[in-house]
Amino acid sequence: GIKCGIVGLPNVGKSTLFNALTKSGVGASNFPFCTIEPNTGVVAIPDPRLTALAQIVKPQKTIATTMEFVDIAGLVEGASKGEGLGNQFLANIRETDAIAHVVRCFEDDNVIHVANKIDPADDIDIINTELALADLESIDKQIFRLAKKAKGQDKEAIRQIEILKKAKPHLEAGKPLRSLELEEEEALSLDKEFHMLTIKKTMYIANVDEDGFENNPHLDVVRKIAEEEGASLVVVCNQLEAEISELEDEEKLEFLEGIGMTEPGLDRVIRAGYELLGLQTYFTAGVQEVRAWTVKKGATGPQAAGVIHGDFERGFIRAETIAYDDFIEFKGEAGAKEAGKLRAEGKSYIVKDGDVLHFLFNV
Ligand code: GDP
């Protein structure tokens, strides 16, 4: 599954956001280091298309696709040197696909700030510096480890060291690797082989007060930083989201309308994560279940099948494909087929967002 790690300084509202996301009741408290173990929650991706498909197919079950969120606590200044929860924290981040960086953009004297002042630029810098330092340390270790092999003319080791040495000065300049221009292969290496933290896709989540969406200088600072880094930004009031997540569906709509919102801010957070990772959704629509699945943009038919089961990918023959709009317009598979909208697509088919797929495969 896809995993998104929530990071940020203590007391900026990470647990509050995480709780709202998962409603799992992990204790939010006005106390740094409250969330010690990484807390993992699985979140359904909101998608109105799933409901529309279910209305036509009337299946026994409707299953949304999901994203995993991990509340990663304990990053403070000096984490890369083992302060706070230090290395534990860094290990947890390494396992994620993307990072949601929560930044405090609200004033509240009742909520302690670890540095005793609300300064988003400084907060962001502390986190990013710790991550860069952790990467630097890891790079030095790996260069050291590979040096002997490289001396022995081991081609693979030489290649790896070259990549590491390209990354190093960028980190030394205090910049995240995601802003370094790299060949696709190099980026892949730094990510999957060397588990660099600062190469991970990142979005900022500005946590504002209820009245802090406009005329908020803290928010302006974060917006500017995100723009400069080419990172995405989502503005939410985590506390409000926590309250909204407690409501029943009907109350929720009423409440949202009352405050002039059309959807919970969390939906924007989830969708931003989805966008960030270049993901799209396809559907399977049978009478037993209508279900949404997550696949990378650009994935082929077999790769999409592989999301369901490895055997589907290996034994892939073809995918009976109906575009989402056709499925809706012709009110289901039979209608779409009659209208000539059901296509048989082979191994090289590039799956499109919203495709309704039925896989045929050899076992
Ligand atoms: P974490 O340490 O980053 O996980 O922070 P928490 O989620 O535990 O939040 C720390 C404190 O800030 C708690 O007392 C929250 O109720 C409070 N808090 C979180 N979000 C907001 C917000 O949007 N506005 C205000 N005023 N307080 C918030």
Image (cartoon, rainbow, N blue to C red):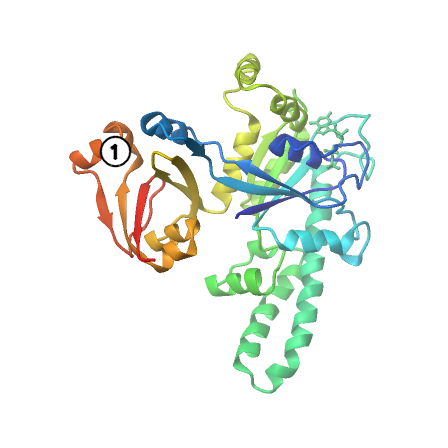
The one of 301 and 213 positioned closer to us in this rendering: 301
Amino acid type at image mark 1: Asp
Name the image quarter holding the C terminus: bottom left
The x and y percentages for residue 280 are: 42, 43
Relative vertical location of residue 184 with respect to residue 325 in this rendering, above or below: below
Quadrant assignment for ligand 1: top right
For the point 53% across and 77% down, the residue is 156
The x and y percentages for residue 121 are: 70, 41
Q: Residue furthest bottom?
A: 152
10 Å neighbourhood of mark 1: few (<14), some, or many (≥20)? Answer: many
Question: Disc 1 marks which residue?
Answer: 326
Whether residue 222 is visible to the viewer of this picture, yes or no, is: yes
The one of 256 and 317 positioned closer to us in this rendering: 317
Relative vertical location of residue 67 with respect to residue 165 in this rendering, above or below: above
Please give left or right for residue 263 compared with residue 18 in the image: left
Labels in figure, total: 1
For the point 55% across and 35% down, the residue is 269
For the point 77% across and 53% down, the residue is 86
Please give left or right for residue 184 compared with residue 236 in the image: left
The x and y percentages for residue 308 are: 42, 49
The one of 101 and 294 positioned closer to us in this rendering: 294
Relative vertical location of residue 166 with respect to residue 258 in this rendering, above or below: below
Mark 1 residue element: helix
For the point 22% across and 44% down, the residue is 343
Whether residue 298 is visible to the viewer of this picture, yes or no, is: no
Please give left or right for residue 225 compared with residue 61 in the image: right
The x and y percentages for residue 31 are: 82, 35
